[in-house]
Image (cartoon, rainbow, N blue to C red):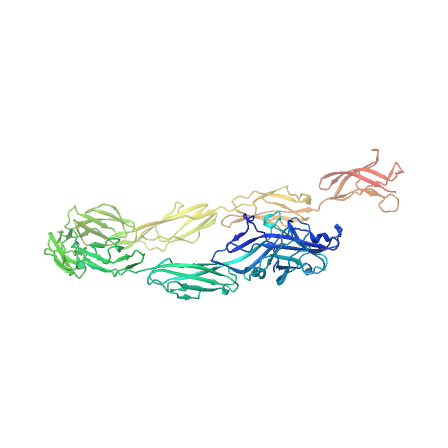
Amino acid sequence: MNKVNIVIFSFFQFFSLICHGQSFDMPCIADSRVSSNQLCPDWATSNNGTIPVSDVAHWTWFSVGCGEGTLRGLWQFNVSPPISEKMLYDNRSTLHLFFPTGSMMGHQYNGAAQNNQFYIERVVDSWGELTVTWNNQPGVTATSAILVPSSLTNPSFDDYLIDISPIALDWICNAEPNYGIRLRMLNETELYRWVSFTNREFLTINKRPYLRLEYAEINASGPANICIGDDFNIECSLNNANDPSQYTYSWTHLESGVTYSTQNVNLPQHQIGLNTYVVVVSNPWCQTATDTVFLSVNEQPQPQVNASGSVNFCQGDSVTLTSNYTTGNLWSNGSTSQAINVLSSGDYSVSVTLPGGCSSNSSPVSVTVNQTPTSTFTIPQSACTSANIMVVYQGNATANATYTWDFGGGNIVSGSGQGAYTITYLNAGSYTVSLSVTENNCTSPSTTNTITVDLTPSVLINGDQTICEGESLQFTYNGNAPTTATYLWQPGNGTILSGSGQGPVSVQYDQPGITFIGLTVTQGSCVSDLYEMPVEVYPLPSPNIINDYSSSCDSFIVNFSTSANAITYNWDFGNGITATTQNATTSYYSGVYDVTLSLTDANGCSSSFTSPGLIQVYPSPVAAFTTTPELTDTIDIENGSITFNNMSVGGNTYNWDFGDGSTSSLFSPTHTYSSPGIYTIELIVSNILGCSDTAILGPFFLSPAATIFIPNTFTPNQDGMNDIFRVYGSRLNEGQLLVYNRIGEKVFETFDINQGWDGTFRGRVLNTGVYVYYCKVKFDSGRVEELFGDITLIR
């Protein structure tokens, strides 16, 4: 038995039972609690048939003045659900008991966890809900008694779901009277055992006890109608069975008496007309269920098709096809009459459906309607003398048909039968071509077409056949075509600049090599062959400039030459100087110069090339700079952050060396020296050609930082240690020191930076105390600094 919490939510809980498909929740129809107590004997005669909670326990009751008490519970449930003939009990029954929500007394025990086990026993005597007491409680049988394990926690507030199938089987299948069940503790002599459950009077409806009975349900099925010869099954489904293998099946065909013992039957005994199949399903406990399948078996028609004449005829004729059934016909073309008139080719069949719903198809009848062949063909409307003319058949006849051609005096070059044909006409004129076709004893009307034959024009071209790259030539037509003809000029890789018709046509050629000028002439429908005349396009000479130098500073001489072969050379050096030799020399001064070379070769073709900015002459740079602050022979390290002001001209890169291992490429950098020493600054200025100039400043001395220290305590006690208050430091040239007492009276003053105060005033030793000093010093760099503070005199 598994102990679980169950809550049933149902709107219909207040009815006598609840049905969940094949599960029936049966209500409690009577309940009561009986009790006894050794010090309260009236308990044994008390009736508790209307209490909402039933306790099963063995407990002490000293709190109410009584001794040990024992409680037992009685329940009776309806075990007769409204089942159909298709249902049978599946030997599964669960008792649902609920802890009374809100009660503080849970299921409790003392000691081991098994100590509040209890029995569920089948009652064998009748009892009254409002009359039963401990002294007249009904008897029970130990047969089928169920021991319910203890709750897992102490206390526990669990709901109980208990399998009582053996007890329910006695009521439903074993003819035992349903007097209900009794709950009692396992050992009623041991104290502190208690379980508590709701009764049917409990206020919360869905917390009232109930008994769930599980029924299996069968459903027999099969087709309602079949045609004789169809394949079919009859089947019996079994729902909500815990172990379907324990169920047996028995089918009976009532009309023949034939039986079957399987759950489903394929193609059982049947006959034309109504067939009745009854299935009886049994389980090993006590019940059977019955269901019935009704099947109507109908005849199968045998349709045939009869033709009124030949089913092979020419287009325009017809044949009548007739069914051997007067009604229920459905032809393959959609007609529902007994006979159909057929005008087109195809396979025709009829499907006949009898009143019982069975249908069959006839064998198809193949009807062939031979179409009348057509004699259409294509031929050009015009052609040229001696040209090949294509004649192509366009009709619907096959190659096996008979074709009768008349080409009107044309010569057949190729073709036979259906074609296609190639024909020619030697003379200009108008010609008629005709065709008729016969196939399957059907002959087409004759088709006639007319063709006009014209003369083919001749073509020649007049014009020069050589030219330099990038120049143009003039061409004219020479032939027998009139000016009204159409002239198609093809310039090869050239470009037509102007002209049309017979010319002149101007064509420019930009690509060197062998090309052509072509012409096709069209007169009417006649097109001449393409005439092509070769044209040679000479490449332009390719001047290249070779020079030994391209850039320099200030001025220089450059030697020029070219590897191009030419008849004439013309140099323009960009500096006002020209030359006509293959090699030449000239001088350049500051500036940027373009150089141009023009050539003419042996074919008379000329070209020119300019190299922009080929020669570049720049002035040399001049390096110069100043500093802020201005540097002297010696400078204080406190002024060691120096800005360098670049005054250079003509440069584009700047390289600074500050003499302490640091460098910079900024135009005007700032540099801070971190250590005293002797330094020399160098600036190198370069231009884009690498010409450079150098400026140097130094050497100069960077002196150490000046320092000053004034103590805050001294002890003038003549022990030779810290007896004098004075100013200490380095690089001090001048100084003034004043000391005041607490009332502002000056007690010491000196202008000697090396003299200090010995703690006296006018020859009198001053007492221990705090005094105020003022100090003004001047360093060797000329810097002046003022300081003041407290000095403590200790005796």
Image quadrant holding the C terminus, namely top right
Q: Position of residue 418 (x, y in %)?
A: 17, 59
Residue 406 versus residue 25: which sits nearer the camera?
25
At 84% from the left and 33% from the top, the residue drawn is 743
Picture quadrant of residue 400: bottom left
Image quadrant holding the N terminus, namely bottom right
At 69% from the left and 52% from the top, the residue drawn is 45
Give the mark count.
0
| Left or right: where 116 falls relative to 459 | right
Which residue in the rendered view is the most extreme toward the right? 764
Which residue in the rendered view is the most extreme toward the left? 409
Residue 500 seen in render: yes
Residue 448 versus residue 385: which sits nearer the camera?
448
| Left or right: where 353 falls relative to 246 | left
Picture quadrant of residue 751: top right
| Left or right: where 218 falls relative to 364 | right
Picture quadrant of residue 744: top right
Residue 530 versus residue 694: which sits nearer the camera?
530
Q: Position of residue 91 (x, y in %)?
A: 54, 61
Q: Position of residue 719 (x, y in %)?
A: 88, 46
Q: Position of residue 113 (x, y in %)?
A: 68, 60
Residue 378 seen in render: no
